[in-house]
Structure formats: structure tokens, C-alpha cells
Image: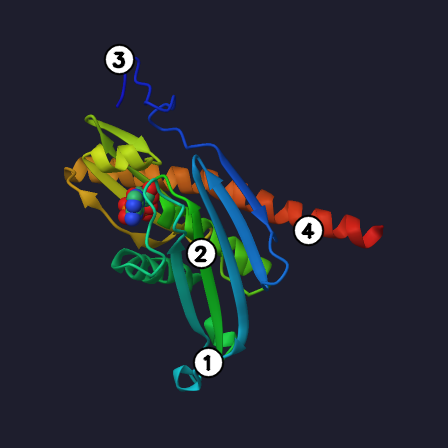
Amino acid sequence: MIDKNGIRADGRRPDELRPVKLEVGVLGNADGSAYIQQGKNKILAAVYGPQEVHPRHLTIPDRALIRCRYHMAPFSVDERKRPAPSRREIELSKVVRGALEPSVFVEYYPRTSIDIFTEVLQADGGTRCASITAASLALADAGIPMRDLVVACAAGKIDGQLVLDLNDVEDKMGEADMPVALMPNYNAITLLQMDGQLTSKDFEKVLNLALDGCKQLYTLQKEALKSKYVAVKEEVKE
Ligand code: ADP
């Protein structure tokens, strides 16, 4: 998967992210929304809320309830995926919610729910991370007060080399994959998972590689948010 010049099968250097495109406010009907393309991944995120909780018995008296659904469209992978939520999607819904929740001032909105939906339109490895990056932008777009944006990226090991932002093939054939989510201004990690095996030295190096990837994506996240509001400002002027 890595040639003798150290270049990966998709032409990237080991420490290079896939090309990323981020867009904010792409859906008219949701309170907040965002779209991410990261390599071949294409993911939409939408947020509703804060709003009244249904069913009511889930209401939390002193804070907002955050719910999340990570879903893969049937056409997102090479063989049709059954549309009903799989065990993996139920797990990833929890993983994405857990990564985002520390960033939201939930105590500002007692007795409400904030509902986050991420819809994977095309998958190519690292969709949980890309979903987190997009969903955090959708939360910001919905005007929900947050401590910081959350940004996520994986790093791992393939062919004995440490690499950033693994694609599907690298994830499946590689030795290890470590998804990390970060609130960069707080230097707080909100998600840390690992598949495979690493020595403790490599573990630290891979973690730092993932954190570097997160910081690069954070710059793009902020640019995407700013460009939405520049566009809105220009519309208002007109
Ligand atoms: P992540 O997408 O966060 O890396 P996984 O490691 O579970 O999560 O999945 C890796 C990749 O495997 C996905 O991004 C996707 O490309 C592929 N994949 C997941 N589920 C399916 C499926 N049902 N059919 C085919 N490919 C799948």
C-alpha cells in the first residue's frame, strides 16, 4: 500500500490528509446543516433544536438532551446496505454523540432536545470522524452555544508506516487505525478509539499525527463557517 518512494496508493504522503471540502448551511429545513467531502467520503449533517423533547418522558430537567443518528445510505457502499440501522450504526451514533456533547453548553437549554443527524452518502473509511467534523459545523450553524468546534481525524499504521487519515482499503488492510476527536482551543480530546495493535511509542506518534490532522481540519472548519456568514452578509446588503 506504500511504494518505495513512500507514496500511498492514492498518491498521498504518509502525513497528508485527503482533499477536504466543507460547506455550511446546505439544507433549508434544518436549523443547522453542513456537508463534508473528505476524499471519497460524502456526508451531510443536520441539526434540529433546541426544541421540545418528544417523547416527553426523556426530558432532562436541568439540561438539554442530545441525540444523534449516524446513518449510511443504502447506496453509500459498493454493495447495497440495508437501510435499517445496523449494530455498527447504533454504536457510531453513540460515538458521534459522545464526541460532540462535551462541546455544547447543555445547561443553557434545560428540558429541550438537540437532534443531530449524519447521513453518509458515500463511504470510504473514516466516516465517524468526518461525521463529527460536519456535525459540529451544523451545531454551530444552528446557533447553539459551544465551547469550541469539535474536529476529528484518524491516523494509523499501514505497511509498517505511520499514516494520517486512512481510507477504506488502508483501514481494512492496515495494522492499526486510531480515530481522534479534539476541541482544539481546549486541547481536549473527546474521542479516542483504536483498532489493531501499536507499540506504546507508535501509539504516541499516531496520536500526535491524528492531532495534527485535526488542527489542519479545524482551520478549514473555521473558514467554512466564515464563508457562510460572508455570503449571508452580502445577501443582506443586496
Ligand atoms: P469508519 O467509517 O469510521 O472508519 P469503520 O471502521 O467501521 O468506520 O468502517 C470503515 C469503512 O468500511 C467505512 O467507512 C466504509 O467505507 C466501509 N463500510 C462500513 N460499513 C459497510 C458496509 N455495510 N458495506 C460495505 N462497506 C462498509
Q: Secondary structure at mark 1?
A: loop
Q: CA distance from mark 4 to mark 1?
A: 32 Å
Q: Which mark is residue 54?
A: 1
In this view, the residue in front, 188 or 232, is: 232
- Whether tag 4 and tag 1 are in contact, CB under 8 A, the answer is no
Quadrant of ligand 1: it is top left
Q: Earlier in the sequence, mark 4 or mark 1?
A: 1
Report the Cα–Cα distance between label 3 and label 4: 45 Å
**Neighbourhood count class around disc 2 (C-alpha, 10 Å): few under 14, some 14–19, many 20 upward:** many
Q: CA distance from mark 4 to mark 2?
A: 22 Å
Going from N to C along the chain, the mark reached first, 4 or 2, is 2
Q: State whether residue 154 is above or below residue 160.
A: below
User: Badge 3 local density, few (<14 within 10 Å), some, or many (20+)?
Assistant: few
Read off the residue under disc 2. 118
Residue at (42, 32) in percent of width and height: 18
Residue labelled 2 has its Cβ within 8 Å of some atom of ligand 1: no
**Residue placed under numbered mark 4 in the picture:** 229
3D distance between C-alphas at marks 2 and 3: 38 Å
- Residue 81 sits above or below residue 198 on the image: below
Q: Which amino acid lies under the numbered mark 3 shown in the image of this protein?
A: Lys
Mark 4: which amino acid? Tyr
Q: Amino acid at mark 2?
A: Thr
Q: Which residue is mark 3?
A: 4
The location of residue 105, given as percent across then percent down, is 48, 69
* Sooner in the amino-acid sequence: mark 3 or mark 1: 3
Q: Is residue 46 left or right of residue 70?
A: right
Which residue: 35% across, 60% down?
93
